[in-house]
């Protein structure tokens, strides 16, 4: 899976570095001074690197916990995110990580303890507030779990802080470690979903939607809270039928009481991000529909956004009450 691992010299003896290398016994290991020597340098070929990314193990020094972007959180709670890893093993064409960094290599920060200290400090600071923390903004929360074990460490931490909510956002079906432990009552395992016909084209390297749905139902069966994330909504011929069937497939046989929340939002990009993605994938069918510009945002335009949002909301209300449904637009 990973042919080459670059390691900052200062973290070669870190316990997490050793743990990760034990899981990659056949990888070539190369020591470096700082990860910036390799990651996000200009004039790197992102698409070429994406075919065979290296793993970089490094130490992070700041910005461990940041306010969640608008549209990422779902209610009035104070929301934060943390990113122990940059870049994703999947290659979904609509993802903002396409071209976010000039490097497609995986950058994993091994000083997990500093993330948890920063989260603890935030919890202490807002003892009288309801807080939600998100993992899975700059990477997939579970896709790299067999190597990193970061999700397990996170669950251990949040289990002893039950007054906060913690969301693992993922497309991964790598749920074995979750099923092997008791559910963490304040954890939500949230899956990003699109109709399979759309996913076949755009969710490159990600598990099939059918396998994700199976994982959702398995987690709920074992007592875990699950989240459903229809974001972004993709406009194409027959989208109404496809999304209606998708929602029906998910809800069939699923214990509705285990659904923590459902969120949805039409595809939209900041202007510069849209430019980067079109330059990376000019042939992509994702961008074949004419988009509209409003200020700094590129989108389908208000009419299509409203039409899609109203339709999805109507379909979800066949199964769920209003308080579990959130319309998220960044």
Image (cartoon, helix red, strand yellow):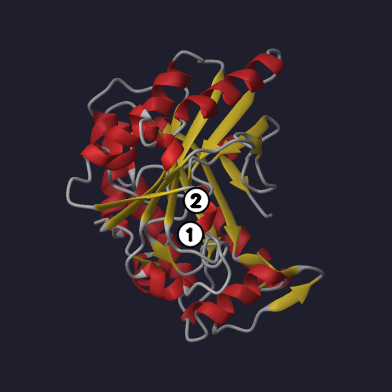
Could you tell me which quadrant the C terminus lies in? bottom right
Q: Position of residue 196 (x, y in %)?
A: 34, 66
Determine the secondary structure under disc 1. loop
Determine the secondary structure under disc 2. helix
- Residue at the farthest right position: 295
Please tell me how crowded label 2 is: few (under 14), some (14-19), or many (20+) other residues with Cα within 10 Å.
Answer: some
Q: What separation in Å lies between label 2 and label 1 (alpha carbons)?
A: 6 Å
Q: Which mark is residue 215?
A: none
Q: In this view of the protein, which residue sits in the foreground, 212 or 116?
A: 116
Please tell me how crowded label 1 is: few (under 14), some (14-19), or many (20+) other residues with Cα within 10 Å.
Answer: some
Q: Position of residue 270 (x, y in %)?
A: 70, 66
Q: Position of residue 68 (x, y in %)?
A: 65, 41
The reply to whether discs 2 and 1 touch (Cβ–Cβ < 8 Å) is: yes
Task: Tell me what residue is drawn at x 58 percent, y 69 percent.
Answer: 42
- Residue at the farthest left position: 26
- Residue under circle 1? 38
- Residue under circle 2? 35
Task: Tell me what residue is drawn at x 48 percent, y 47 percent.
Answer: 33
Q: Position of residue 319 (x, y in %)?
A: 46, 43
Task: Tell me what residue is drawn at x 70 percent, y 19 percent.
Answer: 129
């Amino acid at each position: 899976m990973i042919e080459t691992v670059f390691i900052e010299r200062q973290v070669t003896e870190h316990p997490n570095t050793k743990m990760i290398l034990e899981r990659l016994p056949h990888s070539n290991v190369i020591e470096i001074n700082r990860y910036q020597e390799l990651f996000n340098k200009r004039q790197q070929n992102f698409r070429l690197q994406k075919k065979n990314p290296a793993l970089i193990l490094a130490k992070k020094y700041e910005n461990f916990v940041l306010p969640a972007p608008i549209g990422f959180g779902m209610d009035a709670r104070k929301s934060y995110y943390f990113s122990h890893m940059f870049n994703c093993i999947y290659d979904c064409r609509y993802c903002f990580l396409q071209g976010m960094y000039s490097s497609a290599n995986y950058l994993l920060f091994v000083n997990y303890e500093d993330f948890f200290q920063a989260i603890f400090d935030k919890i202490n600071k807002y003892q009288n507030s309801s807080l939600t923390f998100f993992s899975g903004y700059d990477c997939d929360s579970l896709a790299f779990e067999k190597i990193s074990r970061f999700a397990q460490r996170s669950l251990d931490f949040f289990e002893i802080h039950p007054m906060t909510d913690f969301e693992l956002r993922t497309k991964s079906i790598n749920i074995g470690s979750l099923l092997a432990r008791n559910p963490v009552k304040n954890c939500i395992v949230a899956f990003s979903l699109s109709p399979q016909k759309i996913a076949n084209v755009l969710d490159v390297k990600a598990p099939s939607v059918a396998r994700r749905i199976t994982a959702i139902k398995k987690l709920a069966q074992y007592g875990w809270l699950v989240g459903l994330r229809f974001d972004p909504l993709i406009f194409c011929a027959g989208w109404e039928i496809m999304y209606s069937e998708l929602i029906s497939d998910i809800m069939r046989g699923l214990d509705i009481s285990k659904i923590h929340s459902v969120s949805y939002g039409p595809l939209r990009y900041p202007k510069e991000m849209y430019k980067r993605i079109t330059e990376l994938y000019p042939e992509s069918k994702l961008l074949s529909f004419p988009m509209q510009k409003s200020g700094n945002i590129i989108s389908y335009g208000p009419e299509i956004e409203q039409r899609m949002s109203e339709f999805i909301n109507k379909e979800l209300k066949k199964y769920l009450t209003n308080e579990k449904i959130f319309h998220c637009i960044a």
